Amino acid sequence: MRNLKTLCLLGCTLFCVNGYAQTSGKPAVNDALRPAIEVHLNGYLADKLNGSIENRLLAQDVDRLIAPFKLENRTETSLWQSEFWGKWFTSVALAYKYKPDPRLKATLDHAVTGLLATQTPDGYIGNYAETHRLEGWDIWGRKYCMLGLLAYYDITQDKKVLNAATRVADNLIDDLKKKDGIIVTKGNYRGMAASSVLEPICLLYNRTTNKKYLDFALEIVRQWETSEGPHLISKANTNVAERFPKPKNWYSPEQGQKAYEMMSCYEGLLELYRITGNETYKKAVEDTWANIKKTEIDIAGSGASTEMWFGGKAIENTPINHFQETCVTVTWLKFTQQLLRLTGEAKYADEAERTYYNALLGAMSDHGATWAKYTPLNGQRLPGSEQCGMGLNCCIASGPRGLFAVPLFMVMERQEGIQVNYFADGTFRLKSPKGQTISLTQHTIYPKSGAIEIDVEMPKQEDMEIAIRIPAWSKNTQLSVNGEAVINLQPGTYVNVKRSWETGDKIALQLDMRGRVVKTGKAIQSAAIVRGPIVLARDTRFENAGIAAVLKPVADKDGYIDLTEIPDKTTDNGMMLFKANFIPESYTEVPKGPIAITLCDYASAGNDSTNSFFAVWSAQLFHPSDEY
């Protein structure tokens, strides 16, 4: 078996021959979109974000997260205590970019100082016993430490912290070289957990231009295609649930369907694509994303059972074990947002919005103090188990990473002007193509309402485009600029309004918020109701008869159902309540009804102190004349 040094040299040779070398550190491929400079949100989403900051991020016992890294505690042989610091820390870093609260900065400072104090002379930061390094989740934990340190460096430009991150990477490369040079045989899941370190290695190369890290990144990807590897490129067109046989031991090195780790690897591959411009990498990522969306992602925007891909889209209306792990939800959202930033395409914004408002917010507790580990479509929202004696689990640590990944992506800069991806009450500051600071202020109570008004403010007039997303679900959309209608709006695209913009210009958008009936299943058919991006659910808090009752939604020929909003006076968490008509199961010749049933948004369903039962999918009566 060739050692890592030899393999890295081979990878470099292939890399340079193909003409992708980037010794200057400048990317071969630039993103289509750049994040906003500053965001100030109000209303529904602001409350969710502030709740997470106050009750989760600032409430965390930071020293408890650091304790496993201390020299006297480095006794681990198999568990993953070392991931919690990095997941929580990157959440705080994102929160600080959204809201530069001095308390968040002080928390970041304390967390970095404490972690760096544990770094030993060899560069190692981790919790594994020296004789067990590279085993279990050791490399995975090093990855999260590097991601956290790089996030801090990006905020502070503190060279000492960048140096610490390089020492972690150097130590990993040295450890692998001393062992056998093979990363895809380390840990579980065909090396996907370990080799997902590709992402921070690429980010480290971008910040240092040290070619050693680029060589290492290329070697990781080369090893993916070896017999022991996960074949993430060659099997990009194979269903993610069918890439490898099901192993005898579900959580094992042979398991090739691990959802979270797989997507983490593809996030790293996108970073390598930006560096190299190698179109093979981009195609593998895009093909895999499309396959996950087609075969796995459910109505609420997430998927996976017992943490693995399993072809779940086809059976999402059935009871599923450990469904929608929050770590999977967060990573799917981050993965999707990576592609949005790279390409600027509307399909990625559509998908991320669905995930954010449903699966992600549905996993967060009412006031943001904790996160569910799994979130069924029919059932209860219940807390997950503590892991590794750390007082939390992976999903509690990871949930806020998804929550704070979106605000700076709501309105973004592009070469031609500004792009409005998402809708929320607030003000967004960005740079125009000519370098002016522009403020776009959205006035809306979206997603309760589909009415959005946008005010433009800028120092002087400038010709540019403002691109506005028309969601795929909005079939009847109205858009005007200063009262003049914009025509030919196509769902699932951006409308590019090119004109000379100036302070005082007003954009008015009205999205189609009609209730839509969605059906799934064959022999066992089920129906659900969606309004705008929001999945609705029945909840035992509002139904005396019980959510097991068979009800057929009263819809028109195009599949739309009338919804009547009910003002919510009982909570302050932004719950959305609607009445809709259904035909109940009947044992008379002529069906009775309709009856009015209360529906609430999926994020609020079951998300209360009583852990009420809820149901997105309602079973529909089977008739022998039906096709199945």
Image: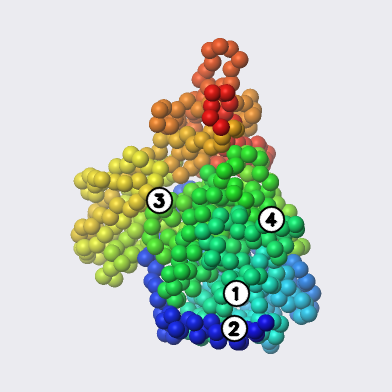
> Along the polypeptide, which appears first: circle 3 or circle 2?
2
Q: Nearer the viewer, mark 3 or mark 1?
A: 1
When asked about the image quadrant of residue 188, the answer is bottom right
Q: Label 2 near label 3: C-beta < 8 Å?
A: no
Who comes first in sequence, dot 4 or dot 1? 1
> Dot 1 corresponds to which residue?
223
Residue 42 point in image, percent of width and height: 44, 52
- Rendering quarter of residue 329: bottom right
Q: What residue sits right under mark 4 in the picture?
A: 246
Which of the two discs, 4 and 3, sits closer to the camera? 4
To which residue does mark 2 refer?
Answer: 7
Determine the secondary structure under disc 4: loop
- Residue linked to disc 3: 423
Is tag 2's residue or tag 4's residue first in the polypeptide sequence? 2
Q: Which of disc 1 and disc 3 is earlier in sequence?
A: 1
- Which amino acid type corresponds to the residue marked 2 in the rendered image? Leu
Image quarter where the N terminus lies is bottom right
Q: Is residue 171 left or right of residue 403?
A: right
Work out which residue is located at the far front of the displayed protein and give it: 227
How far is disc 3 from disc 1 in space, using C-alphas? 42 Å
